[in-house]
Image (cartoon, grey):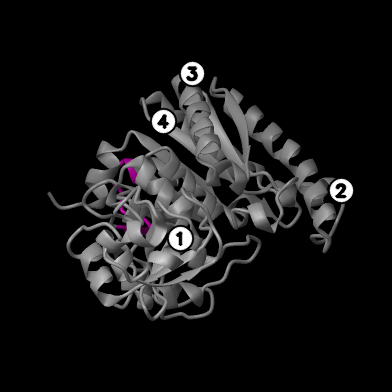
Amino acid sequence: MSINRQRCLETAKRIIVKVGSNVLTKSDGLNLKIIESVSQQISQLTDKGLEVILVSSGAMAAGLRKLGLAKKPDGIPERQAVAAVGQAGLMMEYEKAFERYDKKVAQVLLTGEDLYHRKRYLNARNTLHTLLFWRIVPIINENDTVSVEEIKLGDNDNLSAMIALLMNADILIILTDIEGLYNKDPRSSDDAELIPVVSAIGRDIEQFASDIPGALGTGGMLSKIRAARKVNTAGIPMIIAKGTKKNILLKLFAGEAHGTFFIPKQEKMANRKCWIGFTAKPKGVIRIDDGAVKAILENGKSLLPIGIIGVEGDFGVGAPVEFKNGTGDVLGKGIVNYSSADIRKIMGLKTGEIRKRLGDKPYDEVIHRNNLTITGECMIDS
């Protein structure tokens, strides 16, 4: 059965909605009319039995307004302090808006550390499942008050994609300040054309996106395309639409075609495979030869020592590791059965030679197929 926009929206039960800074803010702080509109629309969707998780930007803008600052501070502690002040104000406005429709909300602040580690990842998922079961709307943002580079998720486009994967969502909707993805920047080119449907994210699509920067947010269009690639690979569709358009969410679910629809792969990826491929932080790199590339991509095989031509980094058994082809293109990620030191000893060997080299052979595979996820980044050539 072909995948199309209307069918995806008709059958969607669990929705992730991300609202960007350019939608939620104006020159003097938060755009309260937009917060009210988004809250009303989400409330109406939940009244119809849908589960909605909101990923919201806007904390920094709210903090700047409260503190009377004209721009973001340069220092990390100062920026984190501004975000802490703003987050309280942002949630207060959401709480007031949702309360008008008899809806309760919950604030969920996450860092990369909460999602990179499997146990904390599962704990976050269980919490969100409980909130949805209680018919509470989770409002998620990155925990900017404690985030540093090592645990930062990057931007809320990436965060929304990771939440969609975490919760096995049926669709991700990103609301931004333009209609969708164009073939050039519509703010500076009169002949820019909206791309209504994207069936594959190739280099041409990335090029369109890279020419359309963000203004207030940290993402811009390119980060939205990267979010689409993640969720589409996992079998989750995505829409980019204009968040300031009146009742945009209700219009989408009423069957109206707005924005850009990104067609996902036919089958959904299992949750654990999603975590391995798109959330677990790689501790190193394994480079593999053309034979291993073919075996993994075309024949669905595990990664054996004989196909390994290089190892980068130091990691232990059970670590998530990227695997790349000989030219450095990322194929995917997997959980290793051997440490980096042992892989260096056995790479290029047949499985029957492992015991002789190591004195033991707990596994034939360096990465078993069940612990391996192909992300597809290496095949973006269109």
Circle 4: element type: strand
Residue that mark 3 sits on: 134
Query: Circles 3 and 4: CB distance less than 8 Å?
Result: no
Residue 67 is marked as 2
Single out the mark in the foreground, 3 or 1: 1
Single out the mark in the foreground, 1 or 4: 1
Residue that mark 4 sits on: 51
Residue sitting nearer the eye, 277 or 39: 277
Give whichever of discs 1 and 4 has the lower sequence position. 4
Place of residue 61 in the rendered image (x, y in percent of width and height, measured from the top left): 73, 52
Circle 2: element type: helix
Give whichever of discs 1 and 2 has the lower sequence position. 2
Horizontal side, residue 222 vs residue 110: left or right: left
**Is-magenta flag for residue 368?**
no
Count neighbours of disc 4 (C-alpha within 10 A) and say few if under 14, some if 14 to 19, many if 20 or more. many
Q: CA distance from mark 1 to mark 4?
A: 46 Å
Q: What is the three-letter code of the residue carrying label 1?
A: Asp
Single out the mark in the foreground, 3 or 2: 3
In this orientation, does residue 181 appear? no
Count neighbours of disc 2 (C-alpha within 10 A) and say few if under 14, some if 14 to 19, many if 20 or more. few
Query: Circles 3 and 2: CB distance less than 8 Å?
Result: no
Count neighbours of disc 3 (C-alpha within 10 A) and say few if under 14, some if 14 to 19, many if 20 or more. few
Task: Kindly identify the residue that appears in the image at 75 percent across and 47 percent down.
Answer: 83
Specify the quadrant that holds the C terminus.
Answer: bottom left
Q: What is the three-letter code of the residue carrying label 3?
A: Trp
Count neighbours of disc 1 (C-alpha within 10 A) and say few if under 14, some if 14 to 19, many if 20 or more. some
Circle 3: element type: loop
Task: Kindly identify the residue that appears in the image at 84 percent across and 60 percent down.
Answer: 75
Residue that mark 1 sits on: 342
Q: CA distance from mark 3 to mark 2?
A: 35 Å
Give whichever of discs 3 and 4 has the lower sequence position. 4
Single out the mark in the foreground, 1 or 2: 1
